[in-house]
Each structure stands twice: as C-alpha cells, then as structure tokens.
Image (spheres, rainbow, N blue to C red):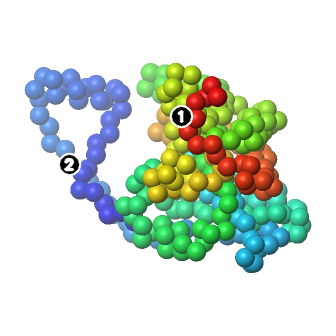
Amino acid sequence: MPARYDVPTLTLGRVQGAKVIADAQAGKTATLRLEARTDMAEAYQLIGYLPGRNYGTDQDEQILMITHTDGPSITQDNGALGILAAVRYFSNIPQQDRPRTLALYLDCRHYITGMERAFPDVIWFERHPEMKDPVVAIMHMEHLGELEYKEVGERNVPTGLAEHAVLWTRNNPILIDAAIEAVKTHQPRRVTVSVPERPGVNGDRQEGWWGVASFGQGELYRQGGGWDLPMFGFGGWLGNYWNTRTGIEAWDKDLFVAQAKTMTQLTGVLMSVDLEQAQSKGVTDSRE
C-alpha cells in the first residue's frame, strides 16, 4: 500500500471554518498539534468465480465483476453486496446454461484514475497478468442505496430523495439501449445513463467515468493503461451524508434492490452479448 504522507490535514466544518478564516484575516496566529495513532492492518483482495460452461478451459470467457471494499461507510462500501446479488441470481442457472464465467474481484484499495501505475506491485492483474486473458467484459458497482442529505443550520438531514447516481456504459448502441431499458424496467430513482465517449450537444465532455472500472475506458486503453471492453458501471454520488451518517440508517434497502436488479439485468446482457457487435465506437459526436 502507499506509504503515509507527511502532510497532516485539518478539516473544519462550515461554522468553525468561518471562525478560523476570520481569525486569519485578523492576523491572529495559532498552533496546530496532530495527535494520532497508527494501527497496522492486513487487507485482502478477494477473488472468486461463478463458473460458466467453459470454465477451466481455453474457451472460457469471463465477465470481471469489480468493486472496492475499503469505503468508510455502509453506503460507500457496499458494491460487493450488489455483485453478490448478481452472483446469487445467476447461481440459480445451471452452469452449462451460463455462457460466461463471473469473475469476482473485490479490491481492498480505492482507485485514482490514471494513477494506478504508481503502485503496480499491489495490482492483482499486474501480479497475475495471465488472469486478464479470459476477461471479455466488465461490470462495476459501488455506492448503492444512498440517500441524499442536506445541511440545515449545523445539522445534516435527509431530503427524502435518493442520492443522484450514474450508470455508465461504452459508446455502443446495444449497450446504451440495454442500460436505458434496465433503468426503465427496475426504476432506480434519480439515475442518469452516461456515455463518457459521447460529448454533449456543445461538443464538451458530459461525464467522466469514475470508480473502480475506470481502467476499462477506451481513452485509457489508447494511452496504454486500460482495457477496451464492453462494460457497465454504477455509482452513487458522494453526498454530504457520510460526514455524519456512516451506518445502516443512511441506507435505503428498496433503492439498493432496484439498483442491484438493474445491474443484474445488465450482467445478463454481458453474459450473452455478441462481443464483436458490442465493441465501443470510441469517442464520437453525440449528434451522430
């Protein structure tokens, strides 16, 4: 894991922060003292498989089911639950009827797009490059079931809405139509279907693909750092809930179920889609 940085950080809330800014503007000084304790912990990258009909042979094709498991709260750190929901669904289908294998990759690290190469010694696929060969598609989930919070005075309170979420896919009509259909079928609240490779009507980039599947983007692939594969990803926005609401009380089980069903349906698309027909068209004008 990356070494600790010798740059202590002080984070203040809006109210206390305003006082500090006012004191600084008035020329006052202060002494900051960091009191901390370092604990050593062992983390695990968990790898597992739900075998498809050709598992264990040279003909095996795998869908990489990927998420991180290092988040600070039940709502940020539950992508693994969404993946397990999809695995549970497909486990009810006989192995000989599953065209592709589901390859689970539950990573104990968070991802910083474009910075992964700084720590190649802990990247699973860098240590085991042969495991990349069977992967033909990627499914990514994180931050499921999140509720929106807002500031009222010095309190964080729920708005009664779901936190906004994004469902990403590559620039291919089969994948885009499948994503829209899945959202319409299962009705997860406040979800935007995003295709980062298709700029908006003014030619500007609409949305970046963030999260643990970012290495699957065509842009990174062309730079030599990613995989150019059919893929879907889902992530709820990081609202201000997790400043004070890190437990199960900030999690909406019905919203989680709708989101998990949406992504399970899309896993089914990747399970059987014609790979050649599902390849991304790369960056194109959204008006094409």
Q: Residue at x 80, y 68 (%)?
A: 52
Residue 86, quarter of picture: bottom right
Residue 288, quarter of picture: top right
Q: Residue at x 59, y 62 (%)?
A: 106
Local SS, label 2: loop
The amino acid on which the numbered mark 1 sits, given as a three-letter code, is: Glu
Q: Residue at x 76, y 60 (%)?
A: 87
Instruction: State whether residue 141 is above or below residue 152.
Output: below
Quadrant containing the N terminus is bottom left
In-front residue for pair 38/76: 76
- Kindly report which numbered mark, 2 or 1, lies closer to the viewer in this rendering: 1
Q: Count up the numbered dots.
A: 2
The amino acid on which the numbered mark 2 sits, given as a three-letter code, is: Arg
- The residue singled out by tag 2 in the image is 33
In-front residue for pair 111/117: 117
In-front residue for pair 230/85: 230
- Where's residue 173, x and y in %? 72, 38
- Where's residue 253, x and y in %? 72, 42
- Where's residue 36, x and y in %? 30, 56
Position of 274 with respect to 222 (left or right) is right
Residue 262, quarter of picture: top right
- The residue singled out by tag 1 in the image is 207
- Where's residue 231, x and y in %? 66, 50
Instruction: State whether residue 155 is above or below residue 62.
Output: above
The CA distance from mark 2 to mark 1 is: 40 Å
Q: Is residue 6 visible?
A: yes
Position of 283 with respect to 2 (left or right) is right
Using a 10 Å C-alpha cutoff, classify the residue at mark 1 as few (fewer than 14 neighbours), some (14 to 19) or many (20 or more).
some
In-front residue for pair 270/143: 270
Q: Is residue 110 visible?
A: no
- Residue 57's tag is none
Q: Residue at x 43, y 58 (%)?
A: 116
